[in-house]
Amino acid sequence: MRLGRFNVLGLVGHGGMGVVYACYDDQLDRKVAVKVLHREVVREQENARRRLLREAQAMARLSHPHIVTVHEVGQVDDMVYVAMEFVRGQTLDAWVQQSPPWRQILAAFVQAGRGLEAAHRAGLVHRDFKPQNAMIGEDGQVKVLDFGLARLHDDDLGEALASGIAAGTDTALLLRPLTRTGVILGTPGYMSPEQHLGLRASAESDQFSFCVSLYQSLYGDWPFSTESFQALREDAVQGRVAPPPPGSPVPARVFKALRRGLMADPRARFASMTELLAELERDPGAIYRRVATLAATAVIAGAGGVIATMGSAGVALCPDARAELAGVWDGECAAEVGAAVRAKAPARAEEILAVVEPQLDRYAAAWVQLRNDACRAHAEGRQSARLFDRQTSCLEQRRAALDATVDAFALVEATNLDDLVQTVAGLPSLATCADVAALTAAIPPPEERRLRVRVQQHRETLARAEVHEHTAQTRLGLQLVESVLADATATTYEPLLAEAHLRKGACRCATGPRRRRCGRSTRRWRRRSGRVMRPWRR
């Protein structure tokens, strides 16, 4: 069989709009992928033909290593085809089913994100990004395809029309909406709230779809309810994002970035794909892992010359820990908190901010100082590895509490701002993380490494749940606690199980008229639990 001047080699795949064939271009001696309309399921032939032409126009505007290249568009009788670069590989959806490590999944999606980033710079919106619309080649290169639902940014529409392009011609198909206002266009599971509501899609809509795809690929589940289309739509429109599954090795910083990209309000998402990708690629722990490797190498070598070349021992090796608070509490976060408070309580905003901002600044500065001191003490051999691990664990839990507190400013109702002010003042004490006696007297973490990592992750989750409890977001707090209790393996470590049940009881007591009485009961339980847990310490 032939499609125009191409010899058909075989079927590659098919979707709702068309089928893709592997073909051979004998004139240019190359293998290509040719997409043609899927006639059996397309009712409006003329409309579908225009969609396919528009996809070709969208992709032809782009020349980027992470976007499939369009070679040409042609027509045979009443059949329109698009000849594209042939990618030897598989879709990201199929590749993820092979369970690659989370770091590889993240790296692959960052490549796909670069393709979307380039499309947005060219004034294009994909409008239907999903793992099935990106290919990973045998060389590991990821390319985005299927721009069939793409159209120019609204901002570029007037400029393109003003340049003399006639909206009624095939060359302007990219500018013309092919559905009436209010008609949903896209794949429901990956659609942004604005698409669900029938509003016009934007680059922020692509960002939302990208985050849904990455969440699904990293955690093996959807960020929203899949009980029904209505439930999924409500969760997306309300911005209700499910917490990560218990025991996930994916760092909390990645989930935080995804959660922001999945905000219901497009203005609350990242300003661009560039910012989102930068946040996903940020890995503060990488610096400290390199420090630990260098320190271990020096110890193993046992050579004075190695130590001498390190200058002032660990001091030069330990970078400023303030980088670890990027996205937790920094200038950008302070601006977001200020904007949230001014929007919720304009009359009291300056009064509230004058209290909370200095407190958050002091807490962050103290955290950075303790983190730096711990790194230096460990690198210089003044602190054992066991004590360093416990101090780091304590500080990570405090950072999680700080992170959740800052996030709460965008989530709480205006009536709960006073509770949030008290939560800031009552952030967990950092002094405990510097108290050697307290750290050594605490119940030791599990010996098995993987279990120890999971317990630490769950303790950070419980720290976040406590913040939700104090800010009247008990439903979110209970969801986080239940995710911990659902991990049957991690809760074999009895201290974690006790901590989770305590937090669950506290969250339940934080609602309704029984709040004050439950608070007294919880304090009594804490005092009693101290005596119960002494045998574990021994």
Image (cartoon, rainbow, N blue to C red):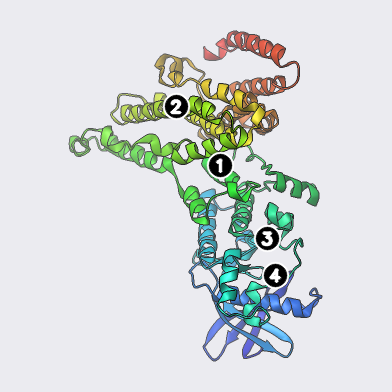
Residue 447 seen from this side: no
Whole-number angstrom distance, CA of label 2 to CA of label 4: 50 Å
Tell me the number on the disc at residue 317.
none
The residue that disc 3 covers is 200
The residue that disc 4 covers is 177
Quarter of the rendering occupied by the N terminus: bottom right
Q: Is residue 506 left or right of residue 112?
A: right
Instruction: Name the amino acid type tagged 4.
Output: Pro
Whole-number angstrom distance, CA of label 1 to CA of label 3: 26 Å
Which residue is painted at 54% across and 29% down in the image? 401
Instruction: Name the amino acid type tagged 1.
Output: Lys
Q: Is residue 409 left or right of residue 78?
A: left
- Marks 1 & 3, CB-CB < 8 Å contact: no
Q: Secondary structure at mark 2?
A: helix
Whole-number angstrom distance, CA of label 2 to CA of label 3: 41 Å
- Marks 1 & 2, CB-CB < 8 Å contact: no
The residue that disc 2 covers is 358
28 or 416: nearer the viewer? 416
Question: Is 215 rendered above or below residue 299?
Answer: below
**Mark positioned earlier in the residue sequence (1 or 3):** 3
**Mark positioned earlier in the residue sequence (1 or 2):** 1
